[in-house]
Image (cartoon, rainbow, N blue to C red):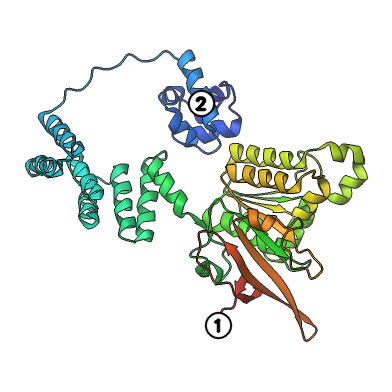
Amino acid sequence: MAESEEETLKAYRGIPGLSQAKAKAIYDAGFRNMADLSKATEEELAGIKGISKKLAAEICEYLRIEIPAEPQKAAKPRSEDDILLDEGLELYKQGKWGQALQIINDLIEKNPRNTDALLAKAEIYLDREKFQMALDTFDEITTLDPEIAKSWVGKGRALMALDQKTRAMSCFKKALTLDPTNEMALEKLGEEDRLPTFVDGLDNMLEGGIPARHIVMICGRAGSMKSSFAYYMLHKLSEKEGRKTIYMSLEQSRRSLMKHMKKLGLKSEAAKSMIVSDMDDMVVVDMAALRKETDSGAIESIDWLKSILNQLKSYKESYGCDAVVIDSLSALYSLTTFKNPRSELFFFFEKLRDLGITVFLISEMYGVEQTQFGYYGVEEFLVDGIIHIKTEEYANRANLFLGVVKMRETNHERDYFPLIVDQFGFGIVRD
């Protein structure tokens, strides 16, 4: 009799280090009972959101001790075709690719549905930079058997070489639906993954969006709608793409923030994958409340940089996370006493990068003319991107303009464009 989900999750909770959320993530990944889980590799488990490599290794070690290994089944006898294919691949390793192809083509002529031989042929074409021939061969394989992840990865690689990136990304995504731990597909998607801003006109300017895992500052004077702009992006990423996002406020309470965003037409129920936090499960960070309720000595004893990093790491391991907004740097600086700002900020930014998520940092403008993007003057060199929202007064009215000052790995315009905010959201006017 099959175990129920509740029974399985209860059994998983008995494994050290597995919370309810992590147990559910493993169950949803297809491991529906302890027998399934005992057959999982560390790589498969580490590919599940919320399961670190260390935890995956600990789970496998625990299961090896607790569940006796099944006796190995006798190896399936190798066919004559398998032996010939190995001979062909060995010839190719020796640089005799013509002879190798002859053997492989003979196997395919004998059995046109021999997907192993077709895969070998396609890989040889890829290696020899005969990309169209490789693509044609991978197409044959995906037609014969669309459930082979390797063929979709190879097809994606061939398409990338032929400069057909959109089709290539679709192939890598298809491969991941078949094999969520496929390292090549994960790597290729990671290289090209961009987070759309959903700001009308901006994504085209950014070649599709902001590169994943970038650290980006959103800068502007007070009243330039930096927080609203950042919240809008995360809300839409959650609503439209199902991305896991976190808006972390260090000065405005969650209630106040949600009330303000509702006035912009952004309803929390539409963004189910978004977490809004004023970190009150760690410590109340509403600045006014913090100063009233906490003595100055206690505030100074908290390592805020470390606390934020730990909070984000915990969120990612428990729920998964693609992007986070930290609002704001000025609030963080007011809580932190730096002995060596350049060095400490460098390590803070590097540790943010190590989290493997896209980070948006809201920053006030500084300097006499308010033209400095970061308080210490080093932030603009440490981040990967800077989006500047500036205000200009005209006829007793403050108009907003948006410019992308910096965005690594992206060819973009550096002009400033009018930023429009209406019932449809944010947009820039480029005409």
162 w.r.t. 119: above or below: below
Q: Position of residue 11 (x, y in %)?
A: 54, 22
User: Is residue 31 in view from this perspective?
Assistant: no
CB of mark 2 within 8 Å of CB of mark 1? no
Task: Give the mark nearer the N terminus: 2 vs 1.
Answer: 2
User: Is residue 199 in view from this perspective?
Assistant: yes
In the rendered view, does 431 fall on the left or right side of 122? right
Q: Which mark is residue 431?
A: 1
**In the picture, which quadrant includes the C terminus?**
bottom right
Report the mark closest to the observer, 2 or 1. 1
Please tell me how crowded label 1 is: few (under 14), some (14-19), or many (20+) other residues with Cα within 10 Å.
few
Question: Tag 2, which secondary structure?
Answer: helix
Amino acid beneath label 1 = Asp
When asked about the image quadrant of residue 117, the answer is top left
Residue at 45%, 28% in the rendered image: 42
Q: Position of residue 311 (x, y in %)?
A: 69, 40
Amino acid beneath label 2 = Thr
Residue at 47%, 31% in the rendered image: 45
Which residue is disc 2 drawn over? Answer: 8
Determine the CA span between mark 2 and mark 1: 58 Å
Q: Which mark is residue 3?
A: none
Please tell me how crowded label 2 is: few (under 14), some (14-19), or many (20+) other residues with Cα within 10 Å.
some
